[in-house]
Every structure is written in C-alpha cells, then in structure tokens.
Amino acid sequence: MPRLAAASLAGTAIEFYDFFIYGTAAALVLGPLFFPTFSPLAGTLAAFATFGVGFVARPLGSVLFGHLGDRRGRRPVLVISLLLTGLATVAVGCVPTYETIGVAAPVLLLVLRFVQGVGLGGEWGGAVLLTAEHAPPERRALWASFPQVGPAIGFLLANGVTLALSATLTEAQFASWGWRIPFWGAGVLAVAGIALRASLTESPDFLQVREHARVPLVEVARGHWRLVLLTAGALAVGYAVFYAVTTWSLSYGVEQLGVSRTVMLACIMAAVVVKGALTPVAAVLGDRYGRRPMCLVGCTAIALWMFPMVALLATGEPLLMFLGFLVALLAFVTMFSVIAAYLPELYEPRVRCTGAAVGYNLAGVLGGALTPMVATAAASGEGTPWGVAAYLTAVAVLSLGCFALLPETRPVREEAVVPATG
C-alpha cells in the first residue's frame, strides 16, 4: 500500500502541476500576451475562459478513460492520461504569442488546454480507484487520501517555480520567456511519473468482475444518473472554493489591490501547505466517523466562512489574507479528504471508473470552470467584492443539499457476537 499510494500521489501531483501552471499563467500573463486587443479586465476574463475550457473537457476525459478503465483496467489509464497531459502542457509553453501569429495563438492555446483537460479527466479516476480498491476497507479513506494530496503538491510545484521566476526575473523577462519555463518542466515530470507507474499491479476489484460493462457510460446513464448529478452538485463547492483561493484571488490581489505577485503567491502557497499536510489526518477521521458527516461539516464551514474570507482578502494585508485562505482550505479538506473513498464506494465495480470520474469532473465544470470568470466579473467594481462571497456561499448551500441526499458508505466493522448463557 505505501508504494502504491506513493505512485498514485506522484502521478496526481504531476498532472495537477500541469493543470495549475496554466491557471497561474492565466491569472498573471496570458491576458496581455494572447488577448492584447482587449481591455485589461476583458483580457483577464478571456484568459480565464481558456482556463475554464480545461474543466469542460474533463468530463469527456472521464468518459473516454472511464470506458478504458472499466473495460481494460485502471492501470492503463494512469500511464496514458499522464502522457497526454504532459505533452499538451509542454506544447503550451511553445505556443507563439498573438504578436507573432495573430489569432492563431489563442486558438492553439484553447485546443491545448482542452487536451490537458481530457487527460486530467482520466487521471483522477484511475489513480484514486487503483488505490482505493487495493486498500483494506477499514483504512480506505486514509490510503485513498494520498492521491488527494497530489493536487496540493502539484500546486506548490507550479507556484513555487513561478515564485522563483518572479523573484529572479524582471517583469519584461517574465512576460517575454520566463512564463514558459514551468510548462517545459512538465515534460521531465511526465517521464518520471510514467516510469514510476509502469510497475503498478492491477486493481483486485477489477480482476474480480466476471462480466465487464460493454458500454459503461450507457449503464451509468440508465442506472446511476441521479447519483452522478448528486455527486456533481455536492462536489461543486470544493472546486469553487479551491479555485477562488488559488486562481481568482491571485489575479484580484495583484490587479485590483496592488499587492505584489510574490506576496500573493506566498500567502496562497502557505495555506496550501497546511491543507496538503492535514489531508490524511482528516481522512483518518473519515474512516472513524464516516464519509457523509465529514462532507456535511466541511460544506457547512465553507458556507459560513465565505464572507469573512472575502473581507480578509480585501484588506490586502498578508497575514489576514493568509488567515482567510487557510480557514477556507481547512473547510475544503474536511470534505475532499474522504471523497476518494466516498465516490468509489457509491458505485458498483463494473461501472465505477466511469461513474465516479464523470460525477467528479462534472463538478469541476460547475465549480471550477465558472468560478474565476464569475468572481472576476463580480469584483470588477469598487469596494469589497461581496458578490464573490455571495456566489461562493450559494454554491456551498447547493452542495450541502446534495450531500444531504447521498447515503453513508463507510464499511461497518463486524463486532464479535457473544453467545448468551442460560
């Protein structure tokens, strides 16, 4: 289990590095480089729109790779999805800007971001299922939480590289060529991840399925459509909060508040470090107290914290912004630490890869694709952006209602039966 968890964690870290580096670049430089004819606000919105395309593509990736995972096994999904995402990310770093090739530049950016999303849509299902299906039932949330630590590590890698470049390059150098370096680094990481995953064994649950689904998506649509919609609605708040903190707030702090890019990145990264470290701890609580209670608590905390978080962000003070981000991400991890065990347990093994991945990635469209654009538009005026807080709170209430309708799935330990004495 430690070797399997480490390989899954490393792979998700690399894939989410690829995904997050685009979000950071969209917040900082892609607007003026690829949409120079737009106003600064419109350019940022356009850059975030290409960012959102990756989320729109993720359900397609979950269908394609879910079919592969349910028909041929979880293991092939891990290698192919990582290769696809890595190649697309390296290619983004090679795209000429609008000044060089005109409108073809944003079009290429859009296509490559779509390919990135397809690859990541398959990654989560393969990595989480392979770990969760190997894990002992009483410790499934703990072991399955390690792939969930991967996004935090990927985010730290992406923003750490950006922070280092920001500290050593001038604004002109960063805008000219410095922003491309993190994208090129994805190629090295992808090769390392593929080598690490090549020796993994297939999931025992998959091997025990006697008759595999011929078209998994059709079976999911017929027999599990309500479950897919509920899980998508339930998980939407996690995406919304995470990308509000890590992507929109970065753009807002730099462009609207005048906070330096280095300070904003440092505040966000410090909160993400704590979030990543506490993910397995929260997962242990999920094994003890159940998946659904953890999700309900985390979702409620998010709903209560969004207005304070936005108020703290609007101060522009580093310590207060860090506090706002930290509490938001702790509420997030209370919920998302158990999701990797919860979603697979909701679906039967023959359609598990497709069902769990589609629900998870549809949530990304609802919460992740829209949030940076909606938040940027809502914060375009003067004063504290209360509209952003209202939007995030509304998403949290929606997710809370969906979680309330989902069942508990934590395996119940069999207690020893003491025979009665006469």
Image (cartoon, helix red, strand yellow):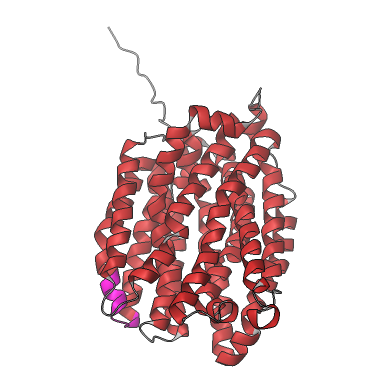
From where the camera sits, is residue 1 visible?
no
Left or right of 331 on screen, residue 101: right
**Most distant residue in the top direction:** 422
What is the x, y in percent for residue 90?
Answer: 70, 69
Question: Is 73 located above or below residue 378 in the figure?
Answer: above
Question: Is 89 located above or below residue 7 in the figure?
Answer: below
* Residue 53 shown in magenta: no
Residue under the point 39% across and 23% down? 416
Residue under the point 34% across and 58% down? 331
Question: Is 70 located above or below residue 393 in the figure?
Answer: above
From where the camera sits, is residue 164 visible?
yes
What is the x, y in percent for residue 224?
Answer: 48, 31
Where does the C terminus fall, quadrant-wise? Answer: top left
**Snapshot quadrant of residue 88:** bottom right
**Snapshot quadrant of residue 316:** bottom left
Magenta highlight range:
310-318
Number of callouts: 0
**Snapshot quadrant of residue 173:** bottom right
Residue under the point 46% across and 81% down? 40
